[in-house]
Amino acid sequence: MKIISAQEHHAAVSPTALLLANDLDPCALDLTGVTRIDLVFPKFTDGRAYSQAFLLRRRLGFAGELRATGDVLIDQLVQMQRTGFDVAVLKEGVDASAAQRQFERFAGFYQGSAVEASPQFAKAT
């Protein structure tokens, strides 16, 4: 997962990007020509963007970039990656190096995810 600052996010304006409010149903969208979808976490306690990301990846097969924006904290990053996010925009004042260390804490997962659908036990050893 790529971690970027709010300044980098605002500088990366794209005509093929879509900002999706967290109360909209992704299944009702026409994703033709969309290469990036920004999903919003208005508060860290509001997890609807996780469900949107999972639906976009697994049910709708969206292969473009999913970007987490809003109240993004470092303790959410691993779950964001597992539900399909590619990029996380950190809140102001959050240390990007501390955020990157979150991914080093977990070597693997038993369950499947939006990115890797097969559970660990179903994989050939």
Image (tube, rainbow, N blue to C red):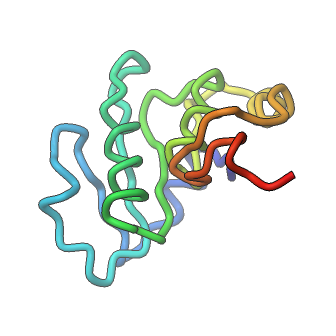
In this view, which residue lies farthest toward the left?
Answer: 28
Query: As drawn, is 17 to the left or to the right of 102?
Result: left
Residue in view at x 68 percent, y 48 percent = 122
In this view, 104 is above or below 3? above
Based on the displayed image, in which of its 4 quarters is residue 41 positioned? top left
In this view, 89 is above or below 97? below
Can residue 97 be seen here? The reply is no
Residue in view at x 26 percent, y 82 percent = 32
In this view, 51 is above or below 32? above
Of residues 87 and 54, the one drawn nearer to the viewer in this rendering: 54
Can residue 41 be seen here? The reply is yes
In this view, which residue lies farthest toward the bottom?
Answer: 33
Query: As drawn, is 30 to the left or to the right of 95?
Result: left
Residue in view at x 43 percent, y 67 percent = 36
Based on the displayed image, in which of its 4 quarters is residue 97 positioned? top right
Label total for image: 0
Of residues 6 and 112, the one drawn nearer to the viewer in this rendering: 112
In this view, 32 is above or below 107? below
Based on the displayed image, in which of its 4 quarters is residue 105 positioned? top right
- Residue 118 image position (x, y, % from top left): 60, 50
- Residue 120 image position (x, y, % from top left): 71, 41
Residue in view at x 80 percent, y 55 percent = 124
- Residue 125 image position (x, y, % from top left): 87, 51
